[in-house]
Amino acid sequence: MINFAVHFLTALKFFISMVFDIDMIKRVYEALPGKVEATRKMLGRPLTLAEKILYAHLYAPTPTAYERGKSYVEFAPDRVAMQDATAQMALLQFMTCGRDKVAVPSTVHCDHLIQAKVGATQDLAIAIDTNKEVYDFLSSISNKYGIGFWKPGAGIIHQVVIENYAFPGGMMIGTDSHTPNAGGMGMLAIGVGGADAVDVMAGLPWELKMPKLIGVKLTGKLSGWVSAKDVILKVAGILTVKGGTGCIVEYFGEGADSLSATGKGTICNMGAEIGATCSVFAYDEKMADYLKVTSRAEVAALADGVKDHLRPDAEVYADPAKYYDQVIEINLDELEPYVNGPFTPDLAWPLSKFAQAVKENNWPEKLEVALIGSCTNSSYEDISRSASLAKQAITKNLKVQSEFTITPGSELVRYTIERDGLLNTFDQIGGVVLANACGPCIGQWARHIDDPNRKNSIITSFNRNFAKRNDGLASTHAFVASPEIVTALAIAGDLTFNPMTDTLKNQDGVEVKLDEPTGFELPPAGFSVDDPGYQAPAADGSGVQVVVSPTSDRLQLLAPFTAWEGVDLKGLKLLIKAKGKCTTDHISMAGPWLKYRGHLDNISNNMLIGAVNAYNDKTDTVKNQLTGEYGAVPATARAYKAAHIGSVVVGDENYGEGSSREHAAMEPRHLGVRAILVKSFARIHETNLKKQGMLALTFANKEDYELIQEDDVIDILGLTTFAPGKTLTVVAHHADGTSSEIVVNHTYNEQQIEWFKAGGALNVIRASFAK
């Protein structure tokens, strides 16, 4: 009891003294009423919440309205967050731009480089040893430039952000596609590439096309087996993986206000899977309660003072179709649990129809592994509801049939659920607690399986389930559901089990039924933590040395990319014509490749190795036009580069879907790819390509994709008069002596064209600071 009291007081002291960036938050709230009123007057109408936050964060005031989906707008975000895998490249770029310190509050979170293999303690120790060079680099560079550093084991970036930094009405960018998680706290939080983070950390405006707005009206209230996760699983089924592209999804209605703050965060987090710029909920009592329990009562009081400006105007509630570009309505009273997958997060199955789908599609019915937690679902509410089912397994004498893992989202959550006995409950059913890190969610999983080629099924409470995503195995059928459904299916070991209607035979041979899960939105005894894992930066970092060994295979200082030659690009070789889904996982895989995220040349050896070649339906096997032989994509690109020949990548719909990783843009740039020509782009990837001085082009006529042939030599014409809204021409010279002239579109504005001409946005920034 004495030890517990000491730990509690230590934790309390830490959080009382650590209301981060309170002066910045005060400035935002002091200016908010005036900015909202000025915007309302300028637009001459009531405002949605997203509009209030967007216009309140303009880099410079505007006398006229911006057009949704068309106008490029410069914003001034309040803060930047980076995870360790993407922070390496972002900070390697930042250290070359000429700033002594970041211009806005920024943080680095060490969560991606910890492989899940045995259990939390051993896995973390191995990661700290294995990644020492990278962690030392990130710690020292954070110390030098005034960046807060969260050590390995502190937690997953998005959970740590919502616990410590997210505040209603704020705007942040983060170098991870699931940054929108903070929308659960009423913040516009947007995933970006590292070059965008450099802009903001350097004090420059951050550019974004003014998003369209999708309104999701929630009525009713969740009950029983249904959770907040099921809201976004249903929305994903409605909008698909590209239906939210270029849009902010704004949730409203009494149903929205009834959800916990962390439940709201779950919904916003997985909004990345529909391509949304971000998602957001209005400030309410649930958010205030969460601020208070995470020792930010001062922030809650400030938000209460401007509450009307942190919610949509009343007229928007009354007639949403008038103010949103699209409106979806979901009655939470009627919602049932969903299971989405396999291989894509938008294949949505109501639980009542899932068993039938499993049988009809011949998916493996046996559930081999069930995994809960991650940045999407590791709140106290999630864990306590799952633990209530684990407790039933114990009391009803049920043997858990699947492997079962638990990934706490942060040390704050882990410490608290251990204190409250929830981890012990999971331990009693054979659950394995993994480190407070991303782990299997991003492919950092040393999975134990007898035959990696055997078709098998897993289910997670994560957010993304592309082929090979979790364990690197194409044979794995990965499904996504709420932590409660995942836990119930783990107990059954069978994908066709419906806990709402079916019974299980226990170890005594008796048929028993699982009761509905129960839990707590917030810990009844409050949160506690011993060491949250935070390192504050040096007050003066001028004397801090950032050392990168020239012989390191993990870190590599960056050399600027070369500027455009000033002429049309001719004689380019087709590198690969990618067929079907080509996500950033296909372009730049994670898993074991994460260790090279700070070394551009080494990680470029994974470039497009997961993309399917349209000419042979194989991965990582393309024709080298110089030799006529087939080989790996990166090796072929290097051969062209060595011969001073540029190349072109051709792709399908929604190219670059998924993670924010800018390596998927930097690797092609590094290996001599000059243009990416596709049917359509995912938002973040298109921006990343532009930032690196690449040409991101789309077919004006999507059927022209079929004109591209394997031995094509490609010219890109019209670059000497490259201008916004003006098409370019691609000429594909075929091996038989004929050619196809193809009109291509682009979305470059004047500033982005300058990035192309200079060889990348960083070159423009560097030149600006040099002046």
Image (spheres, rainbow, N blue to C red):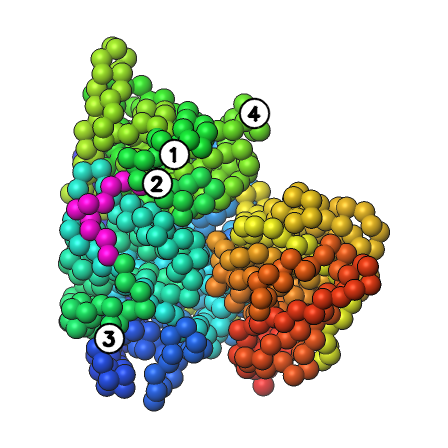
Question: Do residues under tags 2 and 1 come within 8 Å of each other at their CB atoms?
Answer: yes
Dot label at residue 108? none
Mark 4 or mark 3: name the one nearer the start of the chain. Answer: 3
Magenta residues, start to end = 329-338
Mark 2 or mark 1: whose residue is earlier in sequence: 2
- Kind of residue sitting beneath label 1: Ala
Check disc 1 and report its element: helix, strand or loop: helix
Category of crowding for the residue at label 3, using alpha-carbon neighbours closer than 10 angstroms: few (below 14), some (14–19), many (at least 20): many
Q: Is residue 38 left or right of residue 642?
A: left
User: Of 452 and 420, which appears nearest the observer?
Assistant: 452
Question: At which x and y percent is residue 445?
Answer: 49, 37
As measured in the structure, the alpha-carbon distance from the residue carrying label 2 to the one carrying label 4 is 28 Å
Is label 4 in a helix, a strand or a loop? Answer: loop
Q: Which residue is mark 4?
A: 451
Q: Which of 195 and 251 lies nearest the eye of the viewer?
A: 251
> Is residue 273 shown above or below 195?
above
Q: Residues within 10 Å of mark 4 (few under 14, many from 20)?
A: few
Residue bearing the label numbered 1: 357
Label 2 sits on what residue type?
Trp
| Circle nearer the N terminus (3, 2) | 3
Find out whether the residues at labels 4 and 3 contact each other: C-beta distance under 8 Å. Answer: no
Residue 349: give its label: 2
Mark 1 vs mark 3, foreground winner is 1
Q: Is residue 635 magenta?
A: no
Which is more foreground, mark 3 or mark 2? Answer: 2
Label 2 Cα crowd, 10 Å radius (few <14 / some 14-19 / many 20+)? many
Which badge, 2 or 4, comes first in the chain's sequence?
2
- The chief SS type of the magenta part is loop
How dense is the environment of label 1, judged by Cα within 10 Å: few (below 14), some, or many (20 and up)? some
| Residue depicted at x 23% and y 28% | 501
Q: Please report the residue visible at 63 percent of the width from the left and 71 percent of the height from the top.
A: 743
Question: Label 3 amino acid?
Answer: Leu
